[in-house]
Image (cartoon, grey):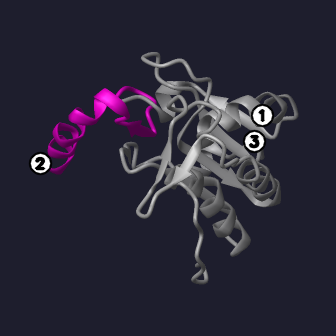
Amino acid sequence: FMAKQTVDLPVYWLKPHLVAKALEAGYDAVAWIDTDAVFHDLERRIESLLETGEAMVGAGDNPFWRSPLNTGVFFVQGPAGLALMRRWSALFAKTGWRRTETSWICDDEWAGTSFEQGAFVEHLLDDALAAGEARLVDWRVLQTPFPVEGAFTLHFAGEFKRNLPAYLDLITD
């Protein structure tokens, strides 16, 4: 869906950029799911999360962490979603980041404002929630690392990553 182009951003900051590109290409809605997350409730349609028309639906971290939004799993839709992704992408500031020959390195706090998640929380979340542009669902819907009732996705972030192989074994037997 994307024309080849060179984008030199830290991998974290590719998230809003790629979601914006998908919306620009004409997709009505885009689901972002990190590589350490899985769709769990395969009977539930993604549209069920976007039924109230907001530009973005996400969830806070599981209680192990404290961020009001974890950008490992989120859903975006429509022109308002595209506008939000563009505002988010524009927050990338190279301060805190340095480019090596093979990668980007950040010396700032993990998930702080130099990272895409912290920047969204610091600069966009409150206004987006107040304007009805974004909606947060219970963390157990999108961010739980355990297959609990109501979970649409499971996110095996951080220490919970070691549980992913056992979960995959469970669902493939």
Foreground of the two, 132 or 52: 132
User: Is residue 120 rendered magenta in the image?
Assistant: no
Farthest-out residue, left: 173
Dot 2 falls on a residue whose secondary structure is: loop
Which residue is at 39% across, 37% downward?
A: 154
- Please rate how many residues cluster around mark 3, counting C-alpha atoms within 10 Å: few if below 14, some from 14 to 19, many from 20: few
Q: Which residue is mark 2?
A: 173
* Amino acid type assigned to the residue bearing label 3 in the image: Thr
Q: For the magenta stretch, what is the residue range?
A: 146-173
Query: Which residue is identified by label 3?
Result: 52
Q: Residue at x 73, y 71 (%)?
A: 24
Would you say residue 146 is visible in this rendering?
no
Provide the secondary structure element on which disc 1 rests: helix
Three-letter amino acid code of the residue under disc 2: Asp
Res. 83 in view: yes
Rounded to the nearest angstrom, the CA distance separating label 3 from label 2 is 36 Å
Sooner in the amino-acid sequence: mark 3 or mark 1: 3
Looking at the rendered image, the quarter that the N terminus falls into is bottom right
The secondary structure type at the circle numbered 3 is: loop
* Between marks 2 and 1 in the image, the one whose residue lies nearer the viewer: 1
Asked which quadrant contains residue 127, the reply is top right
Asked whether, in this view, residue 32 is left or right of residue 152, the answer is: right
Mark 2 crowdedness (10 Å alpha carbons): few <14, some 14-19, many ≥20:
few
Horizontal relation, residue 16 to residue 78: left or right? left
In space, the residues marked 3 and 1 are separated at their CA atoms by 23 Å
